[in-house]
Amino acid sequence: NAGVTQTPKFQVLKTGQSMTLQCAQDMNHEYMSWYRQDPGMGLRLIHYSVGAGITDQGEVPNGYNVSRSTTEDFPLRLLSAAPSQTSVYFCASRMSGTEAFFGQGTRLTVV
Amino acid sequence: DAKTTQPNSMESNEEEPVHLPCNHSTISGTDYIHWYRQLPSQGPEYVIHGLTSNVNNRMASLAIAEDRKSSTLILHRATLRDAAVYYCILRPTNAGNMLTFGGGTRLMVKP
């Protein structure tokens, strides 16, 4: 039981490049979400999903896309990376009414 | 969404109890009070949650005011490993609602 697994752990992108941050969970959780955390700040919700095929926007969705084709996976796509997207990204999953489990994070730098 | 207010930072001595306060004066009747903590360079982890009654688990205790406008997370004997940012979060019971993080309280534990 690995919990929530995020890959990669570190990534450097050039401005304008695209990439996909991977998130997988093996707990059969319905709900999955993506957050970003800027230095010294709390986490902000980017996108979330309440089940396969269902996604919705959070507080800061611009510049990011998500899809949920399976229960296990919830990838986050950066369409055209910008320096303002330099941050640490966390994926989380949970069942309805239970606590959330977070991945270890992906540290992204856009130069 | 109802907001929470926490002190930016607190200090404690090792092996002493720690009381971390949280004000949530606009809490609604369906909001659960959740606490998460984030150790350095890690994703947040669940600590405890409650609705109206005080709660205990192996990590901590949660004391909720009778009017539910404030709560206190109690670590009974702080260890160096408890040094982290502690987030107090209100989560409505509606299905699909994700966690909204504020700035949290940075707890420093002195040996």
Image (cartoon, coloured by chain):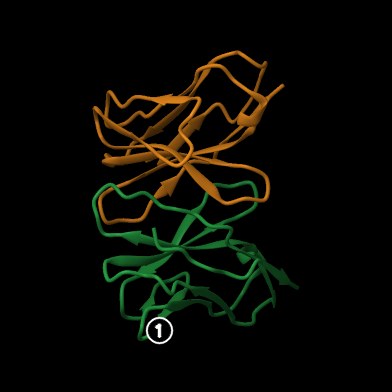
Q: Which residue is at the front of the view, A46 or B16?
A: A46
Going by the numbered disc 1, the residue's amino acid type is Ala
Q: Colour of chain B?
A: green
Q: Is residue A5 visible?
A: yes
**Chain orange in the figure, letter:** A
- Which residue is at a point 26% across and 41% down the rendered structure image? A30
Q: Label 1, on which residue?
A: B65
Q: Residue furthest bottom?
A: B66
Please determine whether, in this image, residue B77 is positioned above or below residue A99.
Answer: below
Please determine whether, in this image, residue B32 is positioned above or below residue A71.
Answer: below
- Which residue is at a point 67% across and 26% down the rendered structure image? A83
Please determine whether, in this image, residue B38 is positioned above or below residue A38.
Answer: below
Q: Which residue is at the front of the view, A40 or B61?
A: A40
Indicate the chain on which mark 1 is placed.
B
Q: Which residue is at the front of the view, A1 or B68?
A: B68
- Which residue is at a point 30% across and 32% down the rendered structure image? A55
Q: Residue furthest top?
A: A17
Residue B89 point in image, percent of width and height = 44, 62
- Which residue is at a point 56% across and 16% down the rendered structure image? A80
Q: Quadrant of the C terminus of chain A?
A: top right
Please determine whether, in this image, residue B77 is positioned above or below residue B101.
Answer: below
- Rendering quarter of residue B33: bottom left
Residue B6 point in image, percent of width and height = 57, 69
